[in-house]
Amino acid sequence: MSTPKRFGNIIGGEVVDATETTLNINPSNTDDVVGEFAQASLTDLNAAIAAARSAAPGWAATTLGVRHDILRRAADEVLRRKDELGALLSREEGKTLSEGIGEVTRAGQVLGFFAGECLRTGGELMPSVRAGVSVEVTREPLGVVGVITPWNFPVAIPAWKIAPALAYGNAVVFKPAELVPASAWELVDILQRAGLPTGTLNLVMGSGAVLGQALIEHTDVDAITFTGSVPVGRGIAAACVTGPTMKKMQLEMGGKNPLVILDDADLDTAVECAVNGAYFSTGQRCTASSRLIVTEGIHDRFVEMLCDRLEKLTVDDALKSGTDIGPAVSAEQLKKNLAYIDIGLDEGATLRRGGKRLTREHNGHYLEPALFVDGNNNMRIAREEIFGPVAVVLRARDYDDALAIANDTEFGLSAGICTTSLKYATDFRNHIRSGVAMVNLATAGLDFHVPFGGTRASSYGPREQGRYAVEFYTTVKTSYIAAG
Ligand code: NAP
Ligand code: MG
């Protein structure tokens, strides 16, 4: 085995090596080391925050033309290198190559979108209620934004946080998930070379519990944007409000997303939505539909057809052509998925297919896509986010029953319905308590130019992406002007 390439943190425009490092392991082949990545110390973190702090005023004063050009150049490089970066992403995270390339493409599109969007940050001029006074409402950057991201979208989520942060004039300290530092490193490197001034964007790699926690507690950080699990999100929220500086925060968290399938659904559409939503990307999506809520009349036919379709899926090395589903991201995640198979069986659900560990040419974290039937919505497999290729079918009497089951969850990220009835589709969009509603589409798979986020335990704070991102990454100033 050749010596893996070593990557340092990126602080104040310099690549900074560290005494401690971690190996980035390919989940499709655990003998394959993607690289050796520096672990930032608390001293490194403080240096990164100080660099961002001193860069922030200069960056906020940079002309919009300069900001636009930098983001546009970065977008172009990401898109030009999508095959190479997609392969790197799939190698470190385990989603299939086409999913990896698709995610990189999306990151490029997001960068391009915000290149344009920074030119459109207008304000408002309003009359005052007082004579001789006018009111101007303008948007200003927040200062230093801490970006904390999960492992399941190693480049798209960092891009959709970092691009608007920079577009609206903020400096950034970015801590990616420990499992997937390679895509994060490439993204920061591309943005640096696109012309960002020194210290505007800093990358610190390391553990959430130590480095992430220190980042959220640091008094020189003005805001935190986080995507990850609910327990970590809750802790971040508490730290942001109890700290002396009361940080602005945006939290995007988990889901237990329902896909409702009604008797009048087109069966092929319903099965495709279920396969895509529940199993693609190895079920490791916050928008995955892990609860399949199916009405009586179509239930048995749907389950039969879904099982036939699952039989045909190829679970293998993420980079191999023909692979439909890659491995779990880590041994720990695979263990968690297998534990939920046991939990479902203990709770009395029927494991209709899958759920066994698979061996392939190389040693990886492979799991046969699992489908439970005869479940009910009180079971842990129907209430807790598993984050693996595991779904449970819940039988519903009729539409009203299905909607009630769909809404009976602490989460509210994405939800879908398969039906040919305009009446039910409309009622569902009106009454489902989620941030995203899909009709005859998988619960996952979102456009890059529209808002994204959820309700209840799935999200906290302003929406991400599209024009709505401006709400989080800027603060509003109201100026009153009278003739002197
Ligand atoms: P996680 O364990 O919550 O970690 C997310 C990030 O937070 C990682 O960078 C992690 O560092 C860091 N972190 C952990 N403890 C921290 C602390 N005390 N202070 C500050 N940062 C800390 O989530 P994950 O396992 O990476 O990702 C899976 C979760 O993300 C799922 O719940 C999924 O639903 C959610 N997700 C949500 C969305 C959405 O948009 N709503 C999108 C994708 C994923 P480490 O690298 O050390 O773990
Ligand atoms: Mg984690």
Image (cartoon, rainbow, N blue to C red):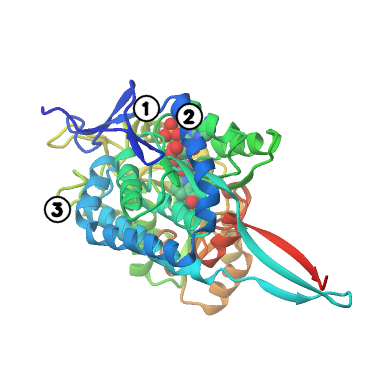
- Position of the C terminus by quadrant: bottom right
Residue under pointer 1: 39
Residue under pointer 3: 321
Residue located at (44% from left, 60% from top): 443
Looking at the image, is mark 3 or mark 1 nearer the viewer?
1
- Label 1 beta carbon less than 8 Å to ligand 1: no
Image position of 100 (left or right of 269): left
- Label 2 beta carbon less than 8 Å to ligand 1: yes
Residue under pointer 2: 211
Crowding at dot 2, Cα within 10 Å, few <14 / some 14-19 / many 20+, comes out as many
Q: Secondary structure at mark 2?
A: helix
Residues 229 and 406: in front is 229
Task: Give x and y (percent) for residue 175.
Answer: 44, 38
Q: Quick check: 404 above or below 328?
A: below
Tell which circle, 3 or 2, labels the residue nearer the N-terminal end: 2
Image position of 10 (left or right of 321): right
Count the marks: 3
Residue located at (46% from left, 35% from top): 48
Residue located at (38% from left, 60% from top): 70
Residues 221 and 285: in front is 221
Q: Taking the image as drawn, is residue 385 in sight?
A: no
Residue located at (53% from left, 59% from top): 168
Q: Circles 1 and 2: CB distance less than 8 Å?
A: yes
The amino acid type, in three-letter code, at marker 2 is Leu
Could you tell me how far apart the alpha carbons at marks 3 and 2 are, in whole angstroms? 37 Å
Q: Secondary structure at mark 3?
A: loop
Task: Give x and y (percent) for residue 426.
Answer: 57, 74
Q: Taking the image as drawn, is residue 451 in sight?
A: yes
Residue 343, by quadrant, is top left
